[in-house]
Image: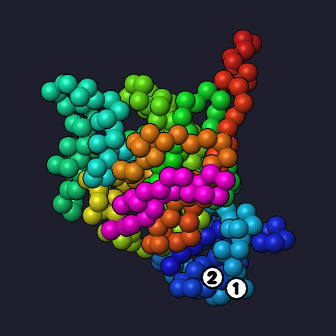
Amino acid sequence: MFLSQLRLTDGRRAVALRDGGGAHLVPGVDSSRDLALAAIAAGHGLAEEARRRGQGAAVDLAQALAEGRMLLPVDHPDPAHLHLTGTGLTHLGSAATRDAMHGDPDADELTDSMKMFRMGLEGGKPRRGEIGVQPEWFYKGNGHAAVAPGAALASPGFALDAGEEPEIAGLYVIGPDGRPFRMGFALGNEFSDHVTERGNYLWLAHSKLRPASFGPEMLLGALPQHVEGRSRIRRDGAVIWEKPFLSGEANMSHSITNLEYHHFKYGLFRQPGDVHVHFFGTATLSFADGFQARPGDCFEIEAAALGLPLRNPLEGAAGAGSATAMVEVL
């Protein structure tokens, strides 16, 4: 079962539920966040809340996506209260690309990346009731950096690279009492600057401060243990790079609950009403194959378990920086 947000042909916002082949509007609500908060207040699940509202008009989500009317599957009326974050070195094989970026092939000592990865293998999936090892964590931005499905991912003028990262993201809302609630899962493009990161792993924070996209649909309920997908880059309509990717806990060194715990253990991230989008990592990058995207290319990420595909063209920014970033003295 999938939940999504879109604009109708008259410009109004709407929420749609898809169970099987067809989708229909959810009556009486135009925000998945509001629907989730109503479910929390009623003491039942998000899917149950959507069902109880009955079936509105049928809607063609594929057409809405093609027409650029699909919205992010969850957002916040104040973009500053939507947090984009992620964890790395979480997937089996993910350390190999990172190690190649930062490792010395002649050195005997493990890189910090490989040490972190091994910590996850050994302690990232604790038994129920126990706390596992904390993962690598990074901040990507807030709702101002969240890009709708189909919209362009803009690479800033100072960037050295503009690379896709095909991932699964967890979508959350914080309840009135500060408890985090998982709404569901979505495909994500955790767009990053891998050349900057390769320069020095302490620049990872800089490399992650880029826009990101997720959706178009939100999977309600549990994430399958094994998720298979494909990541592509198209240029002038033709596929010029393509590779499969794997996700789900069967392909991860950390459990989802462990990653969630180490994010929401901070009170800062448990503010009532806030929305969180947390990217769970990947082991598949075109950058690892020496590919470099250029403006006009289109990133395409799909996995049948997560609904409709996520597509975003790449947009370049002119100039090496921004004059508005220069600090003025008052």
The local secondary structure at tag 2 comes to: strand
For marks 1 and 2 on the same chain, the one whose residue lies earlier in the sequence: 2
Q: CA distance from mark 1 to mark 2?
A: 6 Å
Identity of the amino acid at label 1? Answer: Ala
- Residue 69 magenta-highlighted: no
Q: Which residue is rendered at x = 47% and y = 31% of the image?
A: 195
Q: Which residue is rendered at x = 56% and y = 57% of the image?
A: 239
Q: Is residue 13 above or below residue 253?
A: below
Q: Which residue is rendered at x = 22% and y = 56% of the image?
A: 125
Residue 57 spot, x, y in % from top left: 72, 85
Q: Is residue 277 above or below residue 139?
A: below
Q: How many marks?
A: 2
Label 1, on which residue?
Answer: 58
Residue 301 spot, x, y in % from top left: 52, 60
Q: Are marks 1 and 2 in contact (CB under 8 Å)?
A: yes
Q: Which residues are magenta?
A: 226-247
Q: Which residue is rendered at x = 29% and y = 36% of the image?
A: 99
Residue 16 spot, x, y in % from top left: 64, 76
Q: Residue furthest bottom?
A: 54
Label 2, on which residue?
Answer: 23
Q: Nearer the viewer, residue 286 or 131?
A: 286
Instruction: Answer few, some or many: residues within 10 Å of disc 1's Cα (few below 14, many 20 plus, some between 14 and 19).
Output: some
Colouring method of the image: rainbow
Q: Nearer the viewer, residue 137 or 289?
A: 289
- Residue 234 magenta-highlighted: yes
Q: Is residue 75 above or below residue 95?
A: below
Residue 9 — which label? none
Residue 20 spot, x, y in % from top left: 53, 85
